[in-house]
Amino acid sequence: MTRLVILGKQGAGKGTQCALLVKHYGIPHISTGDMLRAAVAEGTDLGLQAKEVMEAGELVSDDLILGIVRERLAQPDAQLGFLLDGFPRTDVQARELTAMLAPEAIDVAIDIEVPDNVVTERMSARGRTDDTPEAIQRRLEIYQTETVPLLEFFSSQGILISVDGLGTEDEVQDRIVAATERNR
Ligand code: ADP
C-alpha cells in the first residue's frame, strides 16, 4: 500500500515524475488537472463548469473537486494505493482528504522545489491553452497563497519531504524514491 501526494508549482516536473513513480510503485495516477481536462474535452456538466475558471488560471471550487476525487478514490484500483497529483491544493481540500481516508493516512507528501523563474520558462515552452502569460502568473500567485500553506500542514504530520527539482529527470526521480523509502 503506497499513498502518495505530490506537490509543486506548475512546471516543477510533476507530470514527468508522476509517470515514473506510478510505474515504480504500481499505483494509479490520480491527476485532478487531467480529469478536468478530460471533462472539458467531453463537454460534460463538470467540464462546462470548469472550463473558464481553468483558462483564467483560477481554482475550480472545492466542492466540485472534492466530488470528483471522492468518486475516483472509491474505484477498486485506488484501494491498494495511489498518487495524487494537483490535489489537495487548498486547506479545505487537504482537511477533507484526511477525513476521507481516515482512519488511514497519506504515507508521504512530496514537494518538488523549483524556483519561479525556471518554471515560468518551462511553462512558456509547453503551449497548453491555459498557458497564457497571465494564467501562468495567476497560477503561481495562487500556488503561493493557497497551496504553500499545505506544506506546513503535511510537515506538522511529519510526512512532508522536499526534493530539489533541478537536474535530470532520473536524478530527481532517484531523490524522490530514496526520500519516500526513508520516510514511510
Ligand atoms: P498546473 O499544475 O499546470 O497548475 P493542473 O493540470 O494540475 O495544472 O490543473 C490545471 C487547472 O485545473 C488549474 O489551474 C485549476 O484551474 C484546475 N484544478 C486542478 N486541480 C485543482 C484542484 N485540486 N483544485 C482546484 N482547481 C484545480
Image (cartoon, grey):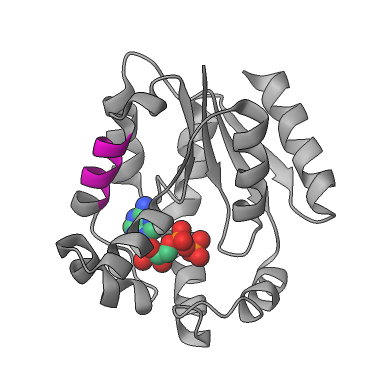
Report the front residue among 98 and 155: 98
Residue drawn 28% across and 29% down?
74
Q: Nearer the viewer, residue 178 or 15?
A: 15
Q: In front here: 147 or 24?
A: 24
Q: Is residue 1 depicted above or below 123 in this figure? A: above
Task: Let me know if residue 144 appears in the view.
Answer: no
Q: Is residue 132 visible?
A: yes
In the image, residue 158 sits, relative to residue 175, either above or below, namely above
Quadrant including the C terminus:
top right
Judged left or right of residue 109, residue 50 is left
Who's the residue at 19% across and 68% down the image?
Answer: 49
Q: Position of residue 4 (x, y in %)?
A: 53, 31
In the displayed orientation, state which residue is furthest to the front. 42
**Residue at 38% of width from left, 52% of height from top?**
32
Is 26 in front, or is 180? 26
Residue 24, x across and y down, in percent: 68, 31
Magenta stretch holds residue 71:
yes
Q: Which residues are magenta?
A: 65-72
Q: Give x and y (percent) for residue 162.
A: 67, 40
Residue 66 lies in the magenta stretch: yes
Image quarter for residue 88? top left
107 vs 98, left or right, is right
Q: Residue furthest bottom?
A: 133
Say how many tags the image has: 0
Check the image and report above or below for 161 versus 167: above
